[in-house]
Each structure stands twice: as structure tokens, then as C-alpha cells.
Image (cartoon, grey):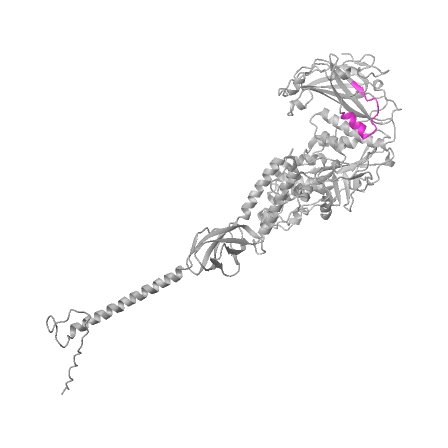
């Protein structure tokens, strides 16, 4: 293998090269073929001395898992190129680069030719840098620096990484070239046809005095989406175990120049468990309290600020209380000291080169970038043994700032600013989509003043943030080198724009892809080594001179998410109204608020379908809660009197007593309800019967009683119950008449029988004067009605002597 080079001239690709892009040897149909799942390793390496100058070229084919993305969206062959070191290249130094060729086609790439080019012009603006790294169409790759043969064939789904060193004489840059970002490109050709081209950058330095760019970095400390507002102990144990999500996050940023934006739910979830908290979570919380990083709080559960505002909540929500979730037995004895057996791992920074002498203009370094102060450690709130903590103690933390809001990127509307200001958020972190700017030739400070007295905003530098995130989540060394080279070049371009003026920018990690562990530490260590970057705190960024050519631009959350959020917030209002009937309202209002905050978390935005299902499930649960006080009387009930008391049974399924008012309204005038509403107290998990006095008016027929329950303050409880009534209002009078008639007949018949019987008795004892017409003279008559006409004389009284 022969490496060709020429310092006299660097010819570009032949004019016919551009036409070769449409005649790739890989057929277009290969784009429709799925990526092979098998891995075909290729291992070969070699050292070939160049012809007058030694050029080391090492090629290693490494197996690459088949991507999960649709093959039709991927290029069949891709090339990436990046410098091996982040140290700036000086005059007389060789340029060491890594070229990686990935073959996602169905054909084997036979040993071809790698060509490395230098961009014809320096990348002196952000737009030029972006256009070079992400061209909209294939353009001229630059001046040829070196041509080398690919050591071995690359099979389908194979990857080859080639280390190439370009001699300083072939680079062709001298001390007369201004410092700054330079573009490089690499192509892979086969049989004279260009298969693919990749582009990268490096930083050239030629002894200028450089003004470093202040870069403030913010990292969110959050957990995946939750259905409730407290993280379960089992999940905390997983997140804070070695290699867990929270552990990896903290390992990568602790005691570095990174501001932490933490979800207070994490702190409260650990503290509320008391002695039952996993030891790993207590150790994690202790490490956080001892960290030197600046820290500010996100909204509780990282609830989406703009979603709350635009869903017409009118305010930003916060927890009401944690008393309902505290188990007093977990605080029966003092909380044990977290074990010292889980020390913070010591990150091992990758040596990426240090700033050369004379590179940094210390006089021009931003004056407001002092070393990160060491905050006073925040101990766990102390309480008397056996005394559970208060809600304030669960959330207490020694934050560096509490007036910073971080809405979801590109979702803030103009009307939201009033809501944020009312909530005490005087400084916002905004994505670039929420800003409008004129054509700027230079990069302004991140600080922007918001009109209308809404404080200021810190605008995230999107290209720098994207490169930082890519580096921190890179899965291969080459990917990391590519991302860090882009990050380094962006900062260098900003520094070179105005050599004597300090600027302070903001870069953020996002919530969707959370980096952590060794790669995050490696990224931050490499960033700290750049001589044209100076660490800056969030306070420094807020104090920087405001950008005058950048203004706020209103955006909005999607309508689907807003409608779902409105239903969630409306349900919370219903639960709050319902709670006034309870003896202890906080038991349900506080729990409902935590659930609402959890479901409004920004983390749900990445999966709208799953979020919609979670919201629907919550609405079902809260519907059951609102139906826990009900009327169990079903009917029908027969009313047969003019005035009766109708029994109505009320059920209480809650674990506490409730007080309700009962209102009964008939559907028509056949019944009249006497008196006002009835107030009743129902004990926990029990039922009570109340009697409603009613009066039957006129007529018979069907009546429906609508039973409505109200809280003491007048809010309706559940849905009204309807009880059918059959009214027979005249049965009472008719029954009395029938009874009186029967009584008269009964007594009348008795009197008549008695009269007839006595007549018969008289006739039998005293016959008439003419003698009996028939029968014996002394016998009684047969006619019972005959009355005796003669009454025998009383016998004479004979004196006793």
C-alpha cells in the first residue's frame, strides 16, 4: 500500500467526480434491504512507511450491530472523519485523524482508496461551520492532503476504522494562517467511483492570544415518567444502585462546572421513606448534598410549565401536603447514617491535550466567571426521634437559585410569561425555537431581556448543545471524537469572531436522552481542557450583557396534549370541591395533586400514546373516588297516605366520615317535599338512612324523586339519584269510609239482632189476653218478635214473725 501526498498542490476531485455520486456501485435497491443482524468481524492492521515521508495507516474492521432504523432512510455507505486529539494543531505538527467506513449495503466493499482533504477556506462563522458539517448537497471536498489504500475489504454490515496521520507538510498550514476551525473531509472510492464522503473539523492555532468563551452547562437530574407523585422504594433502589440512572448522572457531573437542575420529587421520595429508604438512595442523597455544583429546582415531578399554563390552570401547581403518605413507624428511630461503602467514583479524564502556553488571554477572560463556590452541605432535615418530617422539611434544600424556570424546548407562548412571572420565575431557560433574531454575523450572549417586565431568558446554543449531548451519549470512540471535534470547533468559531470580546453562552443536556457514567465524565473533562472555553456559572450567564438582536418568539404546546391536560386539571378541581364533604380533605386533595403533577411531567412528552393511557386511567380512578358517596335506595316506593316519611339510604365507601346535604325534588306536583335540605353525617365505611317527609297533593300516579347530594359548601357530590314513587293519595280517605261503613253495619246488625232476640223472649213468657191462637196456652210463642204484654206482679211480702 502506497500513501501518496503532495505539498505543491492539493487537487480537488476530478470534475467528473460529482457525476459519480449518481453511479454508485451499490444498487439503489439496496436501500430497501434490511440491515443484516449478523456481525462479520474483520481484523487486520498494518504499518506502511510512506515514500519520502512516513505516514502511519492502521485499519481495523470491527463488527457493528445492525441499526434498528429503516434501511430506506440510511445511506448504503457512510464515512466519518475526526481528529484523534482535541488539542489544537500547530505549525509543524502532523494531523492524526480517524476515518471510519460503515457498509450498510448488501455488497462487499473491496479494498478501495481513502482520500483526505482540507477545506479550502477557514470556517470563520457559525453558518459556514454548519454548512460544512451538514451540507445540503454533495460539494467539493477541498484540497487533497493524502491518498491511501483501504487495507482490507469491508463486508455487508461491517465497519472499518482507519487511523491516518497526515504529515505537517501535507497539511500546508503555517503560522500565517489565522487560528480557528478548519474543515476536513474523507472519501472512499472503489474502482474510481466515489462511494461516500464524510466531513469533520479540527482547530488550528498559530500563536494568537485567544479570548475564551464562557460556557455555562446545565444538566437535568430526573427520573423516568411516573404515575404517582412519589417514587416507589424499589425504583429508588434501582436508580441509585451502582450503574443506576441517578448514580450515573451524579457520577458524571459531581463537582464539575455543571449546574444541576434537580427534580424535588427525588429528594422528597427518599426522605419520606425514613428508615425504610434504600441505603443506596440515602448514600446518593448524601453525595448530592456534599457536591460543589450549583443546583436549582425544576418543578415538582418536572411538571411541564407550559402545559400547565396553556391548559388554563392559571398558575403553576405545587404539592399541597405529604402527610397522607407518611408512615410514622418509619421514623420510630433516628435515620441511620448512610453507609460509607458507596464512595463517589473518581472519574478518569481522557487526555485530550491541554491549552498551549499563550493560548488564553487571561485579561479578556469573562470577569464574572469565578470558581464554583462550595455550597454549605444540605443535611437531611432533623426532627425529634419518632417525629415524622413536615412537608416543608421533605422539600427543603440549599439551592443556589429558586427563581429559574426550565420549560420544555420550543413550547413557551407569550401568555405563559405572565404565569411564570406570577410564580416567581424571573429567569427562563429557552430553546432556540423560542427566539427570533436578525441576521447575525456574530454569536451574542445567551442572556435576553424579556419585554413586559418578565425578567430575562437564557437562550440555549443549539449547535453546541447538540454536539455536547452527542458526545456524552456516544457509544463508540469514533462517534465521541466526531462530536467533540464539532463542539470544539463551534466554541473556537465564537471565540475567533470577536477576539477581544468575551461572550457567555449556555449549553444544556436534554431530558429525553440522559447521559451518564464514564462517557459523560470524559466529555466534561475534554470540554474543560479546551483553551478557548472558560467555565461559567448560571449566575454569570444571567449577569452577562443582554443580546440586543435576539427577541422572544411565541410558540405553543400541541393541541392534543393541551386537551388531555385540561381534563386532568378539571378533574383535580372536581376532587377539591368533593373533598369539602370529608372530615380530612387533605387525605385526597394532596394525593390527587401529586398524581396530577406526575402526569404533567415533561418526561411524558416523548410518548404521547402512553401518556394518554395514563391520564385516562387516572380519570377512571378519580371517577370512582367521586362516586364513593352515593344513594343506595333504588325504589319503587309506594306512597298510600297523604303524609309519609320516605327512607333514603346513603352509603360512604371512604375511610373517613363525610357530611353531606340531601336535596329531594319530585318530578311533578303529586308529591310535595316538606322542609329544606337534610344534612347528614355518615361514618367511615358505613351507611345511614335519612327520612324525607312528603305530602301527597292531588291525584294518583307515578312520581320520580331526584336525590342530589351536596357538600356543605354547595358543591354537587356525584350524580343525582332517581327513585320512582307510586302515589295513591285517595286510599286513605276511601279506606276510612269503607272502614266506617263496615263499622256501622257491624254494630247496626248487632243491635238489630239484639232487638229481635228480646222480642222473641217476651213473646215466649207473656201470651196475649185472647189466648194463643195456636198451641198450648202455657207454652211460649214461636214468634221471636212478640213482646210480653203482661208483666207478672211481684209476690207479696210476707212478714216474718
Q: Position of residue 123 (x, y in %)?
A: 82, 27
Compared with residue 442, is residue 797 higher up or lower down, i.e. above or below?
A: below
715 horizontally vs 162: left or right? left
Q: Quadrant of residue 759?
A: bottom left
The answer to whether residue 674 is visible is yes
- Residue positioned most to the right: 176
Compared with residue 239, is residue 702 higher up or lower down, i.e. above or below?
A: below
The tally of labels here is 0
Assess whether residue 126 is covered by the magenta stretch.
Answer: yes
184 horizontally vs 236: left or right? right
Between residues 438 and 697, which one lies in front from this camera angle? 697
The quadrant in which the N terminus is found is top right
Span shown in magenta: 116-135
Q: Position of residue 307 (x, y in %)?
A: 67, 42
Assess whether residue 365 is covered by the magenta stretch.
Answer: no
Q: Position of residue 174 (x, y in %)?
A: 87, 22
The answer to whether residue 326 is visible is no
Q: Quadrant of residue 504?
A: top right
Amino acid at each position: 500500500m502506497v500513501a501518496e501526498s503532495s505539498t505543491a498542490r492539493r487537487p480537488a476531485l476530478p470534475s467528473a467526480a460529482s457525476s459519480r455520486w449518481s453511479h454508485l456501485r451499490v444498487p439503489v435497491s439496496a436501500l430497501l434491504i434490511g440491515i443484516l443482524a449478523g456481525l462479520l468481524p474483520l481484523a487486520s492492521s498494518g504499518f506502511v512507511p510512506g515514500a519520502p515521508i512516513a505516514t502511519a495507516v492502521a485499519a481495523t474492521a470491527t463488527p457493528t450491530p445492525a441499526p434498528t432504523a429503516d434501511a430506506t432512510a440510511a445511506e448504503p455507505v457512510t464515512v466519518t472523519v475526526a481528529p484523534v486529539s482535541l488539542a489544537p494543531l500547530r505549525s509543524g505538527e502532523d494531523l492524526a485523524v480517524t476515518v471510519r467506513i460503515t457498509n450498510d449495503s448488501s455488497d462487499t466493499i473491496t479494498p478501495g482508496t481513502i482520500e483526505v482533504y482540507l477545506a479550502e477556506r477557514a470556517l470563520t462563522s457559525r453558518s459556514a461551520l454548519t454548512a460544512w458539517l451538514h451540507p445540503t448537497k454533495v460539494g467539493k471536498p477541498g484540497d487533497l492532503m493524502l491518498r491511501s489504500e483501504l487495507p482490507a475489504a469491508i463486508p455487508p454490515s461491517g465497519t472499518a476504522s482507519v487511523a491516518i496521520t497526515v504529515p505537517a507538510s501535507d497539511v500546508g498550514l503555517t503560522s500565517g494562517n489565522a487560528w480557528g476551525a478548519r474543515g476536513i473531509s474523507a472519501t472512499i472510492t472503489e474502482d474510481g467511483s466515489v462511494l461516500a464522503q464524510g466531513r469533520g473539523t479540527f482547530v488550528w492555532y498559530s500563536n494568537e492570544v485567544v479570548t475564551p468563551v464562557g460556557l455555562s452547562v446545565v444538566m437535568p437530574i430526573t427520573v423516568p415518567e411516573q404515575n404517582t407523585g412519589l417514587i416507589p422504594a424499589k425504583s429508588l433502589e434501582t436508580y441509585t444502585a451502582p450503574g443506576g440512572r441517578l448514580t450515573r448522572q451524579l457520577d458524571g457531573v459531581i463537582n464539575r462546572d455543571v449546574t444541576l437542575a434537580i427534580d424535588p420529587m427525588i429528594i422528597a421520595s427518599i426522605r419520606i421513606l425514613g428508615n425504610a429508604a434504600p441505603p443506596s438512595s440515602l448514600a446518593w442523597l448524601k453525595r448530592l448534598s456534599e457536591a460543589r455544583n450549583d443546583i436549582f429546582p425544576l418543578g415538582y415531578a418536572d411538571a411541564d410549565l407550559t402545559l400547565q399554563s396553556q391548559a388554563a390552570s392559571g398558575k403553576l401547581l405545587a404539592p399541597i401536603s405529604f402527610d397522607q403518605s407518611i408512615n410514622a413507624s418509619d421514623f420510630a428511630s433516628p435515620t441511620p447514617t448512610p453507609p460509607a461503602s458507596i464512595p463517589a467514583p473518581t472519574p478518569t479524564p481522557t487526555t485530550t491535550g491541554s491549552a498551549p502556553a499563550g493560548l488564553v488571554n487571561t485579561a479578556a477572560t469573562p470577569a464574572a466567571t469565578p470558581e464554583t463556590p462550595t455550597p454549605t452541605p444540605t443535611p437531611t432535615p432533623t426532627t425529634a426521634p419518632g417525629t415524622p418530617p413536615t412537608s416543608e422539611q421533605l422539600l427543603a434544600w440549599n439551592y443556589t437559585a429558586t427563581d429559574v424556570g426550565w420549560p420544555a424546548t420550543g413550547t413557551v407562548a407569550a401568555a405563559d410569561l405572565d404565569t411564570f412571572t406570577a410564580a416567581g420565575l424571573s429567569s427562563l431557560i429557552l430553546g432556540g425555537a423560542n427566539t427570533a433574531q436578525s441576521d447575525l454575523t456574530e454569536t451574542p450572549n445567551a442572556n435576553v431581556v424579556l419585554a413586559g417586565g418578565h425578567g430575562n431568558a437564557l437562550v440555549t446554543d443549539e449547535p453546541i448543545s447538540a454536539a455536547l449531548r452527542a458526545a456524552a451519549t456516544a457509544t463508540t470512540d469514533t462517534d465521541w471524537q466526531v462530536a467533540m471535534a464539532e463542539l470544539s470547533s463551534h466554541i473556537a468559531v465564537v471565540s475567533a469572531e470577536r477576539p477581544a470580546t468575551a461572550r457567555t453562552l449556555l449549553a444544556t443536556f436534554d431530558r429525553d436522552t440522559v447521559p451518564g457514567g464514564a462517557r459523560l465524565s470524559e466529555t466534561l473533562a475534554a470540554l474543560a481542557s479546551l483553551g478557548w472555553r472558560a467555565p461559567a456559572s448560571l449566575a454569570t450567564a444571567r449577569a452577562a450583557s443582554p443580546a440586543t438582536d435576539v427577541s422572544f418568539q411565541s410558540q405553543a404546546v400541541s393541541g392534543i396534549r393541551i386537551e388531555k391536560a385540561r381534563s386532568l386539571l378539571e378533574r383535580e378541581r372536581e376532587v377539591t370541591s368533593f373533598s369539602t364533604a370529608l372530615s380530612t380533605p387533605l387525605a385526597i386533595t394532596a394525593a390527587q395533586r401529586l398524581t396530577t403533577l406526575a402526569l404533567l411531567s415533561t418526561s411524558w412528552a416523548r410518548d404521547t400514546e402512553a401518556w394518554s393511557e395514563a391520564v385516562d386511567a387516572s380519570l377512571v380512578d378519580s371517577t370512582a373516588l367521586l362516586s364513593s358517596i352515593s344513594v343506595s335506595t333504588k325504589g319503587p316506593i309506594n306512597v298510600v297516605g297523604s303524609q309519609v316519611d320516605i327512607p333514603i339510604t346513603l352509603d360512604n365507601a371512604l375511610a373517613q366520615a363525610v357530611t353531606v346535604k340531601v336535596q329531594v325534588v319530585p318530578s311533578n306536583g303529586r308529591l310535595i317535599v316538606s322542609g329544606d335540605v337534610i344534612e347528614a353525617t355518615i361514618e367511615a365505611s358505613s351507611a345511614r338512612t335519612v327520612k324525607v317527609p312528603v305530602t301527597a297533593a292531588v291525584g294518583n300516579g307515578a312520581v320520580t324523586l331526584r336525590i342530589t347530594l351536596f357538600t356543605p359548601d354547595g358543591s354537587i357530590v356525584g350524580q343525582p339519584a332517581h327513585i320512582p314513587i307510586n302515589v295513591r293519595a285517595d286510599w286513605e280517605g276511601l279506606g276510612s269510609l269503607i272502614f266506617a261503613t263496615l263499622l256501622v253495619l257491624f254494630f247496626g246488625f248487632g243491635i238489630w239482632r239484639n232487638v229481635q232476640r228480646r222480642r222473641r223472649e217476651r213473646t215466649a213468657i207473656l201470651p196475649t189476653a185472647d189466648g194463643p191462637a195456636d198451641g198450648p196456652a202455657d207454652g211460649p210463642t214461636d214468634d221471636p218478635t212478640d213482646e210480653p204484654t203482661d208483666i207478672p206482679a211481684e209476690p207479696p211480702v210476707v212478714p216474718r214473725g
